[in-house]
Amino acid sequence: YGKNAPLDKIKACKTIGLSSGASAPEELVQNFISEIKNDIKTKNFSPIYLLMGEEEFYIDNITNLFIEDVLTDEEKQFNLNILYGKETSVDQIISICKKYPLMSKYQIVLVKEAQDLSRTFDGLIDYFKKPLESTILIINYKHKSIDKRKSSFKELKKNAKVFESKKLYDNQV
């Protein structure tokens, strides 16, 4: 969907449906989407957002809400950093996250395809413990979920909002 996603409809709706499952009941999904919209509206952000799961449609659309609504076009030139898991290192992510924004209150660091960092993902644990408040780190971990038993996930959850999407089946579309 990318740029062709119906962002105006997503912004206007009160909920976005997801498949219901044991770990993602519909009510929890609706609450999370409302929280994200409220964060954007009030400019009161969590320092980290982990968007993970099998259904990439919602991950992409939530990410687009941040990109479209948090920074102005001028601010995006200096304060929107898009990194790809295959092409970056944990050290590079941390270095960019620790920079202060230029001519803006916030910077966005978006890590796409973060599942490709899975072997080194634990290296982010120190940043998860003390994230910079002026940085909004958005981690897109698609097609699978992070092992919730790992210490990095437990630490991440303390300072992050975590969203997990389950695969939508044909009868749910």
Image: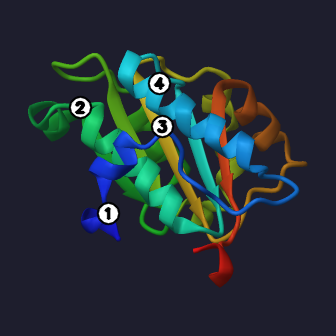
> In front: mark 4 or mark 3?
4
Who is closer to the viewer here, 42 or 159? 42
Tag shown at residue 34? none
> In front: mark 1 or mark 2?
1
Tag shown at residue 38? 4
Q: Residue at x 53, y 67 (%)?
A: 56
Left/right placement of residue 165 relative to residue 56 reads right
Q: CA distance from mark 1 to mark 4?
A: 20 Å
State which tag comes first along the sequence, 1 or 4. 1
Tag shown at residue 137? 3
Q: CA distance from mark 3 to mark 2?
A: 14 Å
Q: Position of residue 9 (x, y in %)?
A: 33, 51
State which tag comes first along the sequence, 3 or 1. 1
Q: CA distance from mark 4 to mark 3?
A: 17 Å
Identity of the amino acid at label 1?
A: Ala
Q: CA distance from mark 1 to mark 2?
A: 19 Å
Quarter where residue 72 is shown: top left
State which tag comes first along the sequence, 3 or 2. 2
Q: Position of residue 44 (x, y in %)?
A: 45, 16
Image: 159 above or below 36:
above
Image: 41 above or below 36:
above
What SS does tag 2 mark? loop
Q: Does residue 17 appear anywhere in the picture?
A: yes
